[in-house]
Amino acid sequence: MSQALDDRTESIRMIRDSAGAVAPRGGDTKRVRALRFQSPGFDRAVFAEMGALGWIGLAVGEDAGGAGLGMSEAVALAEEIGAGLAPEPLIPAMLSARLLAASEDKALLGPLLEGGKVVLTAWQEKADTLAVPGTPDAPRVFVPMAAGADAFLLPVREGNRIALHVLEAAGADLALEKTMDGGNLGTLRADLGRATRVADDIGAVIEQALDEAALVTAGHMLGLAEKAFELTLAYLRTRQQFGRIIGTFQALQHRAADLKIHIALIRAAVESAAATLDAGATGAVRHAAVSKAKHRAIESGMLVLRQCIQLHGGIGYTDEYDVGLYLRRGMVIMNQYGSANLHRRRFMALAPEDVE
Amino acid sequence: MAVSIAPKETTDLNAMEDEAFRLHVRSWIEANYPAELRNPPKRLHWEENKPWYFMLAEKGWLCPGWPRQFGGLGLSPAKQIIFTEEIERHGCARTNDHGIVMVGPLLINHGTDEQQEYFLPKILNGEHIWCQGYSEPNAGSDLAALRTEAVLDGDHYVVNGQKIWTTLAMDANWCFLLVRTDKNAKKQEGISFLLVDMATPGITVKPIINLEYHDEFCEVFFDNVRVPAKNLVGTPNRGWDMAKALLSFERIYLGSPRLSAYAFTRLRQLAERMGAWEDPAFQETYGRLRLDLEDLKSLYGAFVDKLRRGETLGPDVSMLKVFQTELFQRITDTMLDIAGENAGLLEPMEGNRNLNPTGLYIQARPATIYGGSNEIQRNILSKNVLGLPG
């Protein structure tokens, strides 16, 4: 048991270290800023590097060409990616990899896992949902970083089953909207006439993959909050007003202490949920653990990001200063894979007695 | 009083009944205000808002608070409040109004006859657009620590230093500037007011892009800028008291419920669009915000009544600024909570300016920072209202 625990700790440490290749701790934001509002909003070479590092297939089994790791590693990675503000659509790609790994036709899986092809899943038919109706002709909305997709995966309902189709991005009817952080969201017409059917039923897999994506997004939010708070503490330690370092004012010290509590809550919720999933939780137990973590990440994460702006004063409201980049990214990811309201409702509906 | 500028409005509006006056103002605004400028999503630049400025100037309504002999409307405090309420109710854009609300009152109270004669008509006709040179990189909350200095050299002051957060400085051709004229005095006692032509050599304006991706604020650099000594307002080294008196306007202005009220109407529209309106949990939140807004209006009304009675406002007006700005933020926080993935959009949803949760959310962020941060307002309340030690 203790050996297994040590192995886990070691694999999480390794994945954190490897994240430095793309999102170095203490690195600057030049790369991130240069990509904003450029098409596709991220760097395909970095996406390929993420593939080469095994991140896209992190939670895909080794038999299917993945790394066979779990949620504990995935949330640690997402935290580093969040702290480094990498705009590459890693979480959506991980979701797609889960679906392709469960498909009969795996032709696209290899290129996706290597990061050579950007494959995004166009599953959503309305805002703020985790449901996959698979309505054949419904437009698919809010596809993150859709401007850079090579192919889209379309879940399509067939009776009790959810089949999966691949739609090439070239020639697809795609409308793009810009996001606050310089990325984009796509609305895609589900043109099944041009699509290829690759799986008979990914219904159960996509339900689990969306839970995982929600949890990993909570990890991403944790990284944003941690890094923005780190910048804020540095500011409190150096900024002077009234002839004093502002971090000596007790009102601000108390606020910083409160924010630290919130960050600790996010970490505890996210890491415990990851452990729950890694222990094989299914159904209501898995849903509840994920909802608990995502809810906390949004509520506390956005509070921390807002307060980090406030504690910086005017400089925090400028585009030039980095702390605002974290708030903007927070706005973009907060409600992806379910808002706090959705997750609070889902948690309470399950009312799990045994989720402690 | 030597200076006399004929007012354009010849009717004595103060003689009207309040309700009649309100309708008079309202119908004129509705008939004349450019529809495309209603509730602008961002602070407008001079090129965009000047039609409205000139419309008010032409009507003679540009400066409702100035005495009539200076070309203002000379409205009573009660009538000024009605006037402002109608402007806000219609969603009229804020103009480049520093000349109207700051420089005018400053010169009317402290300016020489020559300064009044030269500057006031040029505010009234839109020839001079003013910006406010107060904050500095190391003098924000601690404004009295400002270090931009003005040294007398013959009949000119030579100004060196830097200002920051100067609203719409790129639009302005004049700046009213707080400068240090005595480095040896206590920090509040060595500050003077200077009026500076922005075309003077040595001035550089650099826009700051903010989180709205908008260039509302600027940095302004002064490098050996020569300013005629006659452009000093009032007594040398007494500028701080004048500046503080002008800021009391800002605190009641920032405490006005208009931003929260506007965001609140948009919250309902968003809730209806997102299907959250029928949700009992949302209704709880909405009800709480609504009652906060109603009570803010009541509190604001109590302060306005004081003004109406001709009283001056004390430091307790800081309560309004704190509560209003934080309510504005809570309303826009709730917008993001119900907006789903639209919480990340750069532009209004569906091209509809009324469905702009992210724009309002971002706009609400600096409200607790500018005009004296809420931390400073709480200091004022705890020290000057509650009399707590320290």
Image (cartoon, helix red, strand yellow):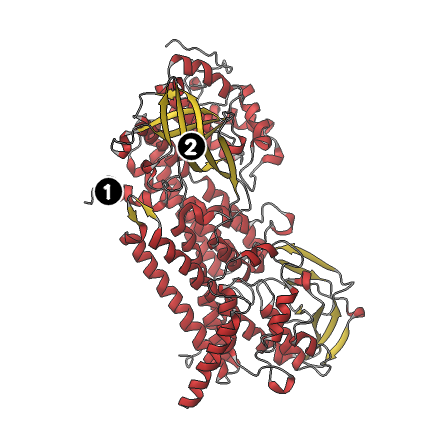
- Can see residue B301? yes
Comparing labels 1 and 2, the label whose residue is closer to the camera: 2
Q: Is residue B382 left or right of residue B253?
A: left
Q: Which residue is mark 1?
A: B383
Of label 1 and label 2, which has the lower sequence position?
Answer: 2
Viewer-closest of B44 and B350 = B44
Q: Secondary structure at mark 1?
A: helix
Same chain for mark 1 and mark 2? The answer is yes
Q: Numbered disc 1: what chain?
A: B
- Can see residue A75? no
Please state which amino acid type lies under the numbered disc 1. Lys
Q: Which residue is mark 2?
A: B133
Q: Is residue A101 left or right of residue B385?
A: right
Q: Position of residue B157 (x, y in %)?
A: 39, 23
* Figure quadrant of the N terminus of chain B: top left
| Residue situated furthest right in the rendering | A193
Q: Is residue A275 above or below residue B280?
A: below
Q: How many marks?
A: 2
Please state which amino acid type lies under the numbered disc 2. Gly
Q: Secondary structure at mark 2?
A: strand
| Residue situated furthest top in the rendering | B2
